[in-house]
Image (tube, helix red, strand yellow):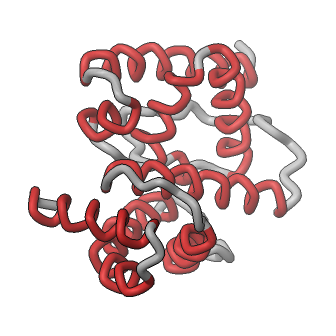
Amino acid sequence: MHQSSTHEVTQLLKAWAAGDQEALQELTPLVYRQLHQVARRCMAGERRDHTLQTTALVNEVYLRLVDCRKVNWQDRAHFFAVSAQLMRRILIDFARSRGSQKRGAGIAHISLDEAPCVCKEADADLLALDDALRALAAFDERKSKVVELRFFGSLSTEETAEVLGVSSDTVLRDWKFAKMWLLRQLQARVGP
């Protein structure tokens, strides 16, 4: 998205937060495609008979966003950060509702570098990653947010830095640390 569109999204978000419902109508087509791309990547590795479809995931995120009445939207990056958090919650809730009892049993290694979204893995992997992210958040919340924004939200290093109010170098350091920490946590679940 080029700079004028980024500025336009930010202005529409602020107008929507101020109660302008027409701003929401203008905003939707500007952000829908990127939300759909993130959801498509998330759903790409799911089984073919998966009951949650890409468009349904985007629509659920959209419905939850519409219910967020009092969000003080900062900018486009903040919007996609909130969207990433919502998408993660939806996917985790879905995996849990499917009755995943064997958390982490036989879990494959997850490459945070290669996968734009953890949803490519089985429900057990998603639940195991969620547990590991919660543990990371208890240890260092910012590093957990970096993973959430980069991994679930597909935000760039610069966008993540903007959302968190830190430098790009800090995001890169946090990202590197968090990947190693999470991989160790996930490997510990599988065992030697």
At 74% across and 17% down in the image, what residue appears? 191
- Residue toward you, 65 or 48: 65
Q: Using the image, determine if residue 152 lies above or below residue 107.
A: below
Q: Is residue 176 left or right of residue 141?
A: left
Q: Is residue 156 left or right of residue 126?
A: left
- Residue toward you, 152 or 70: 70
Q: Position of residue 58 (x, y in %)?
A: 50, 73
At 19% across and 59% down in the image, what residue appears? 6
At 10% across and 56% down in the image, what residue appears? 3
- Residue toward you, 72 or 191: 72
Picture quadrant where residue 12 is located: bottom left
Q: Position of residue 113 (x, y in %)?
A: 37, 32
Q: Is residue 33 left or right of residue 79?
A: left
Picture quadrant where residue 141 is located: top right
Q: Using the image, determine if residue 31 lies above or below residue 101.
A: below
Q: Position of residue 77 (x, y in %)?
A: 33, 49
